[in-house]
Image: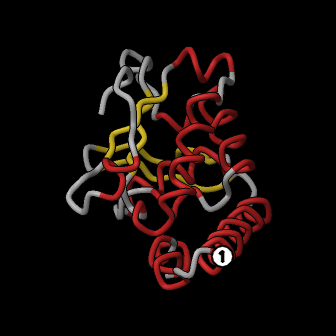
């Protein structure tokens, strides 16, 4: 799905669909959550039919050499997103590396090593990162219980528990 398409419930409940959901630099800079709020209204209506369907694409930073979680305005936006929807990972595709990138945006990490194999990071504050992870775990499980999908909720955050 690109930025101009209209997302429908049918797209979300299709068992073969993955939705690439674009968040633009303009939305990030303006902290514009109108489309994100519409997305979550739809996701919350679809409930467990939409689990694991969303992959966020943050656009407008293609020429920036930093990792997306090193960009302050992206981190600020993602922190607000997680404050509004702490169960967000329930709807993200089942790819731990993608979920980790979203997590890095909200826990404030420092890059400690870059290589051709990847990037190693560490939290700036272990206490704060533990608080955030615990909030995500608790709120995602609570959300799963509220829609009768505790197992799906636990599956969506298992990378945080292992």
How many numbered badges does the structure rendering display?
A: 1
Q: Tell me: 31 left or right of 6.
A: right
The residue positioned 45% from the left and 78% from the top of the image is 155
Residue 115 screen position, x and y as percent = 32, 44
Q: Which residue is mark 1?
A: 146
Label 1 SS: helix
Closer to the camera, 38 or 134?
Answer: 38
Closer to the camera, 57 or 145?
Answer: 145
**Callout 1 crowding tier (Cα within 10 Å): few <14, some 14–19, many ≥20:** few
| Furthest residue in direction bottom, as rendered | 151
Which color scheme did the rendering employ for the protein?
secondary structure
Residue 29 screen position, x and y as percent = 64, 17
Say which quarter of the image contains residue 141.
Answer: bottom right
Residue 47 vertical position relative to residue 92 in the rendered view, above or below: below
Closer to the camera, 105 or 110?
Answer: 105
The residue positioned 36% from the left and 52% from the top of the image is 12
Residue 46 screen position, x and y as percent = 47, 59
Q: Tell me: 104 left or right of 124.
A: left
Q: Quadrant of the N terminus?
A: top left
Closer to the camera, 84 or 43?
Answer: 43
The residue positioned 55% from the left and 80% from the top of the image is 161
Residue 64 screen position, x and y as percent = 43, 19
Residue 135 vertical position relative to residue 162 in the rendered view, above or below: above
The residue positioned 52% from the left and 60% from the top of the image is 89
């Amino acid at each position: 799905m690109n930025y101009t398409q209209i997302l429908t419930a049918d797209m979300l409940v299709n068992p073969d669909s993955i939705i690439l959901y674009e968040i633009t630099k303009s939305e990030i800079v303006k902290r514009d959550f109108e489309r994100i709020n519409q997305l979550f209204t739809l996701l919350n209506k679809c409930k467990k039919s939409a689990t694991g369907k969303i992959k966020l694409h943050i656009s407008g930073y293609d020429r920036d050499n930093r990792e997306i979680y090193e960009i302050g305005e992206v981190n600020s936006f993602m922190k607000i997103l997680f404050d509004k929807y702490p169960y967000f990972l329930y709807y993200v595709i089942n790819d731990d590396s993608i979920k980790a990138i979203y997590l890095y945006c909200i826990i404030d990490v420092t890059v400690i090593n870059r290589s051709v194999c990847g990037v190693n990071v560490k939290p700036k504050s272990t206490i704060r990162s533990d608080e955030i992870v615990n909030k995500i775990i608790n709120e995602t499980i609570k959300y799963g219980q509220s829609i009768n999908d505790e197992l799906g909720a636990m599956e969506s955050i298992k990378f945080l528990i292992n």
